[in-house]
Amino acid sequence: VIEWDKDDVEALKFMKVDVLALGMLTCMAKAFALIEEHKDEHLDLAKIPQEDQATYAMIRKADTLGTFQIESRAQMAMLPRLKPRTFYDLVIQVAIVRPGPIQGDMVHPYLRRREGKEPVVYPTPELEAVLGKTLGVPLFQESAMKVAMVCAGFTGGEADQLRKSMATFKFTGGVSRFKDKLVSGMIRNGYTAEFAKKTFSQLEGFGSYGF
């Protein structure tokens, strides 16, 4: 235990770890104890099926009060629209309801493509390899880094600097210094100026916080 805050720790290049206290884990432990006491059945988290469809049916109806990460009003409003059926769908669900994807105009394109209402167009096979799982939308910071490297010729170090600029969501505008390099790099690699600028606009949204 130290008396430095997270900003001091980051300035000194120490690793930061967020440790969250989740009351629902206590509730689950008590539930397991009651089941064992009254039903003589021993359960633990490892025995819960990972892809239990009855659970996903409840999730799709936004019956998620008390469920960490998907119990907020915004998350519950999105669940019936995204209709999660797998764990990776939940990864998308948690990531998409964030200021970054919303500000970057990624939410509606993703939902339309997921529902088959809009075609997914990849200008190059390289971009499809990066964004295929998210239907052409860079929902994650790692996706943005890979797009910068594969499509705009960023080095790994430059892509990491881009990531850090996206992570500083308290200070807007940090991503803007990468605009010329990203756009010109994408144009040089065969992407249209319009597509390159749209891509940067999406990445710029991460300055408002995203995963």
Image (spheres, rainbow, N blue to C red):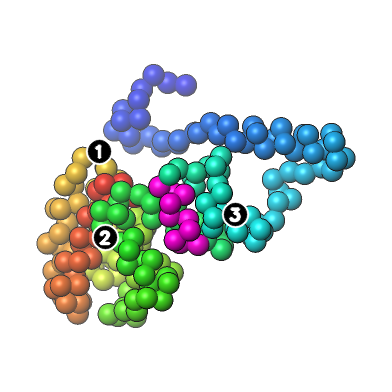
Magenta segment, which residues?
74-83
Residue nearest the viewer, comparing 38 with 86: 38
Name which residue lies at 13% across and 73% down. 193
Q: Which residue is mark 1?
A: 170
Q: Secondary structure at mark 3?
A: helix
Q: Is residue 166 visible?
A: no
Amino acid type for the residue under numbered disc 3: Met
Mark with earlier residue (3, 2)? 3
Q: Position of residue 53 (x, y in %)?
A: 65, 61
Mark 2 vs mark 1: give the one in front.
Answer: 2
Location of residue 93 (image quadrant): bottom left
Percent from the top left, x then y, of residue 42? 82, 42
Mark 2 Cα-neighbour bin, 10 Å: few <14, some 14–19, many ≥20:
some
Task: Give the quadrant of residue 39.
Answer: top right
Q: Label 1 neighbourhood size at 10 Å, few (<14), some (14-19), many (20+)? A: few
User: Which residue is the site of mark 2?
Assistant: 105
The amino acid type found where label 2 is placed reads Asp
Q: Is residue 7 above or below residue 87?
A: above
What residue is shown with label 3? 58
Question: Distance between the Cα atoms at labels 3 and 1?
Answer: 35 Å
Q: Earlier in the sequence, mark 3 or mark 1?
A: 3
Element type at marker 1? Answer: loop
Mark 3 or 1: the one toward you:
3
Reply yes or no: does residue 87 show up in magenta: no
Which residue is rendered at x = 31% and y = 28% of the image? 8
Residue type, label 1? Lys
Magenta region, main secondary structure: helix
Residue occupying the point 53% across, 31% down: 21
User: Is 174 situated above or below 105?
Assistant: above
Q: Residue at x 36, y 66 (%)?
A: 110
Mark 2–mark 1 distance (CA, rounded to whole Å): 20 Å
